[in-house]
Amino acid sequence: MIVFQPLLLTLKVASLATLFSFLAGVALAWFIAHFRFPGKEWMDAILTLPLVLPPTVLGYYLIVLLGRRGWLGQFLLNNLGISLMFTWQGAVIASAVVSFPLIFKSARASFESVDQNLEKAARTLGSSELAVFLRVSLPLAWRGMLAGAMLAFARAMGEFGATLMIAGNLPGKTQTLSLAVYSAVQAGNDALATTLVLITSIVCVLVLVSSGKVLKSSYTKEVDR
Amino acid sequence: MKSSLLKRGLVIVMVSLPVFALNSVTHKSACAQQELLVSAAASLTNAFKDVGKQFEAANPGVKVVFNFASSGALMQQIDKGAPVDVFASADQKTMDQAGEKRLLLVETRKDFVSNGLVLVVPKGSKLVIKGVKDLLGAKIARIAMGNPETVPAGRYSQEVLTKAGLWEALKPKYILAETVRQTLDYVARGEVDAGFVFSTDAIVAKERVRVAAKAEGHQPIRYPVAAIRGTKKLEISQKFIDYLLGSEGQAILARHGFGKP
């Protein structure tokens, strides 16, 4: 079916993008929340930039960086023989970059709202920094990070501009739902566009409802304890 | 102290923004300037910007606003009610479709330029391509062209490759672009090994791409222009079309590499 291919691709790209931005976002948020260093707020601003910049600007950065003649792209091509342009992996990178600040921001806020006395108590009881992170900070900040991940997933599903620029719009290869809708409208295929739009809307509602449930259940568990 | 100054500055900006916005709106309506909205094929970008400037100079009080995209996308916009006055397409087919949808003032339709299709490669490319047959070579992994559904240059490319019996065989190599200018950009950046663009596009990027071969076997490429049904500026629209066909307009277009219609 012409509709399922972009749907599956979109889910694959959005899931992987969320995974990557989650790992990077949580790590950097923890770093910023826990250390004091000069230029900290500048770093925060730069990491939040993808949220503010137009996706086309990000797309351009990515082309300049990862294109076959970009400095990182050239390295990848010459040493590993891979090029990310016009591939679904490229789309994952675009979506990950765009959705990264959503996780980073909410993770930082969550880490900073963790009661420092609890962390200090754990340290006085002999926990290592890693143990403090895994057994105190992370469980207490978990909900906020999950909420951020949900938003990031939703944002990654709708990614358009940066994806179009780096991954192109290749049916069956890099054509995600948002790109398929764009192509269908451009070509005047309103029937296909309507189908795709309805599917996208339904999937997004399902994602929002189910993630809301996950959040709620983890919250009630916490309260029960 | 510093932050309160900053805050005060922000408040001033936020309060005054709507005033500026309002001011520009009222200013616009007070002026007698007429805006002509021209939707034009992406390949006309550079040439039409020049034409627009000269046309404005020759017609004081007229401002030409361009909307460049693939001809197919522009036609869809017009079909959905975009308030366009003049439409210039890079092929007859799109204009015919617009005619069938009764979007045009048919009597204003005229062909105003011709163009050619070429196969271009990145400037430094060492690949030897003398004709479309060479695209089968194993070293050529990516071939860019406009999406044939909406981009006229892509449709001509498909015609060329189909006639050469290569369309199916080369399919895994295609990188479909949204406009002919995107194809050109992909080649110029070296992201693809070769691409199909109009000969006028190759001139625009002659520092970054090299014409490897002429692409033959397509319908003659003639660009039509027409005023859109429902335009409230028919007189200026007609003037613009006449200007394109007149000696001044033709001279500008020829300077950008376009042929006589």
Image (cartoon, coloured by chain):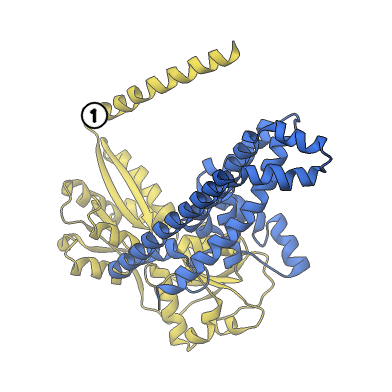
**Mark 1 element type:** loop
The chain assigned the colour yellow in the figure is: B
**Rendering coords of residue B75 (x, y %):** 29, 62
Q: Amino acid at mark 1?
A: Cys
The chain assigned the colour blue in the figure is: A
Quarter containing the N terminus of chain B: top right
Quarter containing the C terminus of chain B: bottom left
Q: Is residue B204 left or right of residue B254?
A: right
User: Disc 1 sits on a residue from what chain?
Assistant: B
Q: Which residue occupies 54% across, 66% down?
A: A12
Q: Which residue occupies 41% across, 54% down?
A: B45
Q: Nearer the viewer, residue A218 or A161?
A: A218
**Rendering coords of residue B80 (x, y %):** 24, 58
The quarter holding residue B137 reads bottom right
Residue named by callout 1: B31
**Rendering coords of residue B33 (x, y %):** 24, 34
**Rendering coords of residue A67 (x, y %):** 64, 59
